[in-house]
Image: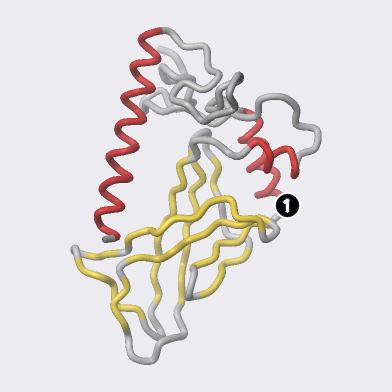
Amino acid sequence: MTDRNALGGKNPNSLYVPMSETEQEFLSRLIEQEVLVVRIHGWGVVPNPTVTLGDLQVVIPLTLNFDRPEVPIQVSYFDLELLADDVSLFREKQPIEYGGLPVLVGSGTCIQMVWHIGIRAIDPKLIKSMMPGAKGLTSRQFDKDTGALTLTGNMKLTEGQRKLVALVREGEANVQAERDAKLR
């Protein structure tokens, strides 16, 4: 049995395309430098959150203690943004329903949640601006000839692996469509 999945990921029991080593190093440095901030638009910020880095995602547990509003309101999503030195790294609306209903948020409310951010690719310009020593291709997802984000990027894959990548991307698109439907 191998210690990698069919696409090179470190979890042999899960099928995904991992970030490049350069992208992982970039995120690792940001975590070590303690420059990350989670902004919950309309509510506040969490400076220097605890972040666990994997080879596909970052996981950020959040404990949100609210000091307003006095009369609780229904909230069906949080608009979350991950920043490093005021540079936006990732932003998404994350549904926060309980039992299919919006959560009541008001003064004294405490919500514990975990934000999972799956990383498909990090903009090479951003990596090179923060890691001047980074050269060449910084992500396996960008095509080496066009620079476009593509299904197979610059990876050398067998036909079987190409089919697996297509299956993974289809699954990701389905999950995103479900999330978008909840946000409507």
| Coloring scheme used | secondary structure
Q: Residues within 10 Å of mark 1 (few under 14, many from 20)?
A: few
* Image side of residue 141 versus residue 172, left or right: right
Q: Is residue 45 above or below residue 117?
A: below
| Camera-side residue of 161 and 2 | 161
Left or right relative to 110: residue 124 = right
Furthest residue in direction top, as rendered: 158
Instruction: Report which residue position mark 1 lands on.
Output: 33
| Left or right for 109, reference 57 | left
Of residues 106 and 41, the one drawn nearer to the viewer in this rendering: 41
x then y, percent, for residue 165: 38, 22
Q: Residue at x 35, y 79 (%)?
A: 105
Vertical order, 84 against 152 (above or below): below
Q: Is residue 37 above or below residue 8?
A: below
Mark count:
1
Image quadrant for the C terminus? bottom left
In the image, residue 78 sits, relative to residue 131, either above or below, namely below
Locate residue 7: give its quadrant: top left
**Going 61% across and 39% down the picture, which residue do you hit?**
123
Residue 32, percent from left and from top: 70, 49
Closer to us: 111 or 101: 101
Furthest toward the right, the residue is 133
Residue at 56%, 27% (x, y): give it.
142
Quadrant of the drawing holding the N terminus: top left
Percent position of residue 143, x then y:
56, 22
Residue that sits furthest to the front in the current view? 146
| Residue at 49 percent of width and 20 percent of height | 8
